[in-house]
Image (cartoon, grey):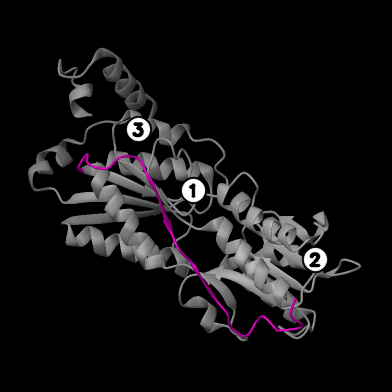
């Protein structure tokens, strides 16, 4: 990048112009102090997560950080707070502190990806995890979204539920459409009619999760079970179900998506699709280091999840 900014003859005119245009747009200027330290500078990789406080993301961050440290890298952690504009700022800031590569998870608001395409033009290695995009250009680590949602829905059906609610996030996110697909496939397999009012896809926030659960429980024929597509929505549903003086699992079964530990901390313990989040972080870091070393080709790694059956799903009658 610095050679392109200095008009080095080693860089082709088209690439040079692209890089210089990006530098102008992002107001990028080499930092003389940073330049003087470059020989002894720490090797840095950047992480962008939608939020830092969730155990799900903090566990992935730990996996990335520990792996990076073993390879001589330090990490800079940034959060988009689920906002598209903040995500662009995070990316710009990481470029400006000269990270060698970036691991990113999309914000819920992100619907277009020009800022990530710009990173490719700057030749900075980038990989995605969990919520991903541009899979033809960047490697990514995802969970088995369709299969996990299908298995979770099938468990609820086999335990006697015919009316199953699905609480998801915004439909422009691939992770939402894939998990919804798994839910719909299970209904189709068991010849259960699809009822649109049982599917509520809004934002993945605690308040929206409570609102979605209120909508489902207020139906003339409320669901007998709910599948919530992440931990925030599952815990929001739990709170709203309790508020209505309904009992889990006696009145309503519930399945969520969480990391390895979280589902054990609630009462009743939550049947959940659990992610090996720490391993997801390790895998993401290995992919990024491969990209930094110019080794790996673009690929998608699917991390298997487990359906952990706990107290929030009741055996009613077997199908």
Left/right of residue 212 with respect to residue 107 in the rendered view: right
Mark with earlier residue (1, 2):
1
The Cα–Cα distance between marks 3 and 2, rounded to whole angstroms, is 43 Å
163 over 139 or under it: above or below: below
In terms of secondary structure, where does tag 2 sit?
A: helix
**What type of secondary structure mainly makes up the magenta span?**
loop
Residue pointed to by mark 1: 106
Q: Position of residue 50 (x, y in %)?
A: 48, 55
- In the foreground, 319 or 68: 319
- Which corner quadrant holds the C terminus? bottom right
**Furthest residue in direction right, as rendered:** 220
185 over 314 or under it: above or below: above
In terms of secondary structure, where does tag 1 sit?
A: loop
Residue pointed to by mark 3: 120
217 over 143 or under it: above or below: below
Left/right of residue 75 with respect to residue 9 in the rendered view: right
| Chain part drawn in magenta | 293-319
Q: Position of residue 289 (x, y in %)?
A: 24, 49
**Furthest residue in direction left, as rendered:** 39
């Amino acid at each position: 990048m610095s050679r392109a900014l200095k008009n080095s003859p080693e860089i082709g005119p088209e690439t040079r112009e692209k890089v210089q245009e990006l530098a102008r747009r992002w107001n990028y200027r080499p930092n003389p102090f940073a330049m003087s330290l470059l020989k002894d500078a720490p090797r840095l990789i950047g992480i962008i997560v939608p939020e830092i406080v969730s155990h799900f993301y903090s566990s992935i961050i730990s996996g990335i950080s520990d792996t990076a440290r073993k390879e001589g890298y330090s990490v800079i952690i940034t959060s988009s707070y689920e906002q598209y504009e903040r995500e662009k700022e995070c990316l710009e800031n990481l470029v400006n502190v000269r990270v060698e590569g970036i691991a990113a998870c999309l914000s819920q608001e992100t619907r277009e990806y020009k800022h990530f395409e710009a990173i490719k033009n700057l030749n900075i290695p980038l990989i995605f995890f969990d919520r991903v995009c541009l899979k033809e250009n960047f490697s990514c680590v995802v969970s088995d979204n369709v299969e996990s949602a299908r298995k979770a829905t099938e468990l609820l059906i086999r335990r006697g539920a015919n009316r199953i609610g699905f609480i998801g996030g915004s439909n422009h996110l691939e992770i939402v459409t894939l998990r919804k697909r798994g839910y719909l496939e299970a209904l189709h397999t068991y010849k259960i009619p699809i009822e649109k009012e049982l599917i509520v896809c809004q934002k993945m926030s605690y308040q929206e999760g409570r609102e979605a659960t209120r909508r489902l429980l207020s139906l003339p024929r409320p669901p007998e079970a709910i599948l919530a597509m992440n931990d925030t929505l599952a815990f929001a549903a739990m709170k709203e179900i309790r508020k209505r003086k309904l009992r889990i699992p006696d009145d309503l079964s519930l399945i969520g998506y969480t990391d390895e530990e979280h589902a054990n901390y609630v009462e009743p313990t939550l049947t959940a699709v659990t992610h090996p989040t720490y391993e997801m972080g390790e895998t993401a870091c290995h992919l990024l280091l491969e990209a930094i070393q110019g080794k790996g080709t673009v690929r998608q790694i699917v991390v298997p999840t487990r359906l952990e059956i706990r107290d929030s799903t009741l055996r009613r009658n077997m199908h």
